[in-house]
Amino acid sequence: MHAVESNNISVMDSLLADDYKGFGPSINDSTTKKEALANWKYNSENLYKSIVYSEYQNISLHVGEGQMAKSGYWVSDWAKVTIHFKDGTGPVNTWVNAVYRINNGKIEYSRTFYNELDILEQLGYGLQ
């Protein structure tokens, strides 16, 4: 969270495992470490003026086995996220839930959930 708020790509790089795989928010969304870092770099340079996490709670649990096949430390965070855009739109406020599997101090896997429609409506878009 601090690396995102401070836009520190090198810290983000150091926290993700080389074989990192991220999913969400949509069912078909997935990203690798290289793609995730490129996306954050682009968004921070072109879209986001600031991202602030507030009202957050983190919990963790060690899992030795299970359906996800790999053991590790699982961390879930729930946060209110406020985004200001460089073009002056926003702010946008949304609740974000992210779940991470961590081994050897690196994030290997993540799944992120947030309401994309709510964000688009706050930006003035609607369904027809």
Image: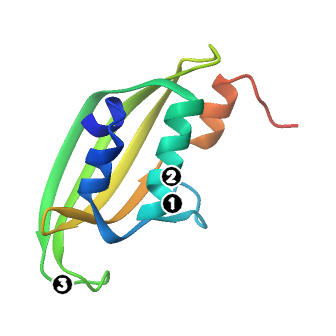
Q: Give the quadrant of residue 89.
A: top right
| Between discs 2 and 3, the one toward the N terminus | 2
The residue located at (53%, 66%) in the rendering is: 30
Q: Distance between the residues labelled 2 and 3?
A: 32 Å
Q: Residues within 10 Å of mark 1 (few under 14, many from 20)?
A: few
Callout 3: SS: loop
Q: Where is residue 42 in the image (x, y as percent from the top left)?
A: 55, 41
Q: What element carries label 1?
A: helix
Disc 2/disc 1 C-alpha distance (Å): 5 Å
Judge from the rendering whether residue 54 lies leftward or rightward of residue 91; answer left or right: left
State yes or no: discs 1 and 3 in contact (Cβ < 8 Å).
no
Q: Mark 1 points at which residue?
A: 35
Q: Are marks 2 and 3 in contact (CB under 8 Å)?
A: no
Circle 3 residue: 65
Q: In this view, does 100 lie to the left or right of 41?
A: left
- What residue is shown with label 2? 38
Q: How many labels does the image show?
A: 3
Q: Position of residue 40 (x, y in %)?
A: 47, 44
Q: Is residue 54 left or right of residue 115?
A: left
Q: Which quadrant is the C terminus positioned in?
A: top right
